[in-house]
Image (cartoon, rainbow, N blue to C red):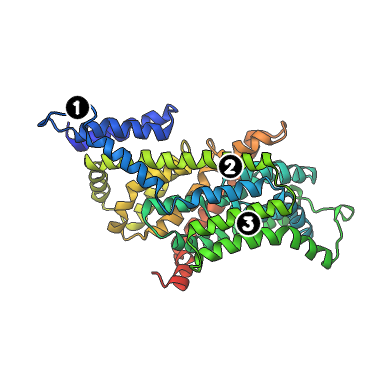
């Protein structure tokens, strides 16, 4: 077998192995070391068993990951999200927005989506947002006689927004993988994220207006009447602190006042401060937040170590050239290439987490972008939109499973799936709009940084 054929076999074994359920990070490292040992073996000189360059490569890749400035922001943003999640800030925020939107059709669903968007911005962790909002907003909507499928779709769709809206952990990982400026990625993702959240809200209000049975208006005796002054006070004590924290972190990054890592450190300190102000900062909550931060950060870092080792060997054996030659031989247009790439990523989203897709499979597409004239920033935002679908599409819609885990027993998984489908169409619509109007992604980076 030639080296490129061995590289293709290496990729095939990896896909087969992860389908069997083996840990992905360590599978990547094991295959990288095993095939790398063959790739770097020199039969012309005497070698001891450990006298092989693959071991140097593994050590160097580990050091590169641990010293990567972009990835330093990951644990800090994670800690900010986890500590905010445990500070009971979100429950106060949802209650306040529910009162503020009480006269709108589908008011609870609108309040839930706005809360999800803000909370997802603070955490970027889909499971955390869906679970917490499933405990807070889902029972309230069911009590208000909302259709279970409709309410389920609201929670599942809103919970995935953290993948796209900055400061998204996914965008940090994509920046580290692709070499695209994380600052420009954040700027480019703001409007698409707002567009998707806006489409969700428009759909909810429109659906509740056309079919009031799925989201009944609150009766007069159920509406809590508050004065304008009281509402402003509520917003000042619940919405404003979290909004100020988020906008301070994003503003510091977007306007060059701080690096992403420095801004993330400010966000982590701000999260601690908010938790203390709300008298929710306990030793148990702090310890749990630190533990979850370390666990998630370690997963991301080991995925990078394994992926970079695997991809280095794969490229050395000529695997990238095989894939590039095959794709270019198809003579695809840029549109067809984007559609093919997004279909593949969509399908990968069923068995894999977003982190594994970004770290392992997206680098296969990146060398092809110049050939098709696709901007890597635009490609990254398309992927961030696409990955929303992986959390909403049966049979592997992880958002649905997160919600099912904490929903009342009478709520069936098929009801949750049914509720997700209309929001899935909103994601597809947003991807189409982004392709037709790419300035949605490029306008803000161009305005702030003069880029593109």
Residue at figure coordinates x 44%, y 66% from the top left: 442
When the figure is inspected, residue 143 is found, relative to residue 117, above or below; the finding is above
221 vs 69, nearest the viewer:
69
Disc 2 residue crowd, few under 14, some 14–19, many 20+, Cα 10 Å: some
Kindly check if marks 3 and 1 are in contact, taking CB atoms under 8 A apart as contact: no
Can the viewer see residue 106?
Answer: no
Identify the residue at the far right of this view.
221
The disc label shown at residue 270, or none: 3
Residue to which mark 2 is pinned: 290
First reached walking from the N terminus: tag 2 or tag 1: 1
The disc label shown at residue 353, or none: none
Disc 3 residue crowd, few under 14, some 14–19, many 20+, Cα 10 Å: many
Q: Check the picture and name the quadrant holding the N terminus.
A: top left
Q: Is residue 28 left or right of residue 266?
A: left
Structural distance between the alpha carbons of marks 2 and 3: 15 Å
First reached walking from the N terminus: tag 3 or tag 1: 1
Can the viewer see residue 199?
Answer: yes
322 vs 228, nearest the viewer:
228
The disc label shown at residue 48, or none: 1
Structural distance between the alpha carbons of marks 3 and 1: 53 Å
* SS type, badge 1: loop
* SS type, badge 3: helix
């Amino acid at each position: 077998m030639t080296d490129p054929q061995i590289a293709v076999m290496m990729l095939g074994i990896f896909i087969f192995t992860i389908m069997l359920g083996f840990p992905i990070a360590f599978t990547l490292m094991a295959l990288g070391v095993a095939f790398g040992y063959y790739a770097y073996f020199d039969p012309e000189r005497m070698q001891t068993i450990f006298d092989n360059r693959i071991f140097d490569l593994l050590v160097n890749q580990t050091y590169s990951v641990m010293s990567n400035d972009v990835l330093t922001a990951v644990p800090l943003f994670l800690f900010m999200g986890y500590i905010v999640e445990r500070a009971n800030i979100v429950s106060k925020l949802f209650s306040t927005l529910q009162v503020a939107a009480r006269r709108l059709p589908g008011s609870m669903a609108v309040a839930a989506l706005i809360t999800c968007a803000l909370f997802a911005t603070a955490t970027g962790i889909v499971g955390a947002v869906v679970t917490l909002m499933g405990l807070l907003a889902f029972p309230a909507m069911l009590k208000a006689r909302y259709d279970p499928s409709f309410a389920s779709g609201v929670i599942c769709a809103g919970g995935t927004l953290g993948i796209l809206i900055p400061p998204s952990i996914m965008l940090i990982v994509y920046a580290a993988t692709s070499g695209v400026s994380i600052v420009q990625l954040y700027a480019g993702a703001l409007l698409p994220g707002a567009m998707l959240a806006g489409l969700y809200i428009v759909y909810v209000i429109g659906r509740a207006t056309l079919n009031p049975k799925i989201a009944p208006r609150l009766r007069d005796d159920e509406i809590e009447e508050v004065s304008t002054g009281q509402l402003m006070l509520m917003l000042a004590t619940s919405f404003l602190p979290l909004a100020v924290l988020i906008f301070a972190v994003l503003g510091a990054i977007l306007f060059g006042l701080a690096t992403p890592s420095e801004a993330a450190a400010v966000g982590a300190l701000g999260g601690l401060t908010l938790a203390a102000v709300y008298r929710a900062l306990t030793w148990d909550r702090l310890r749990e937040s630190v533990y979850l931060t370390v666990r998630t950060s370690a997963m991301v870092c080991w995925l990078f170590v394994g992926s970079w080792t695997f991809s280095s060997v794969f490229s050395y054996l000529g695997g990238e050239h095989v894939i590039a030659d095959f794709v270019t031989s198809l003579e695809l247009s840029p549109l067809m290439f984007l559609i093919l790439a997004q279909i593949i990523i969509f399908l990968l989203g069923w068995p894999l987490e977003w982190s594994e897709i970004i770290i392992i499979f997206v680098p296969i597409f990146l060398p092809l972008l110049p050939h098709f004239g696709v901007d890597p920033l635009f490609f990254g935002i398309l992927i961030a939109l696409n990955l929303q679908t992986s959390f909403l599409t049966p049979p592997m819609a992880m958002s649905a499973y997160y919600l099912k885990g904490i929903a009342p027993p009478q709520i069936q998984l098929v009801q949750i799936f049914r509720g997700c489908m209309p929001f899935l169409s909103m994601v597809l619509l947003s991807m189409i709009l982004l392709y037709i109007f790419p300035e949605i992604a490029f306008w803000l980076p161009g305005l702030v940084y003069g880029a593109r």
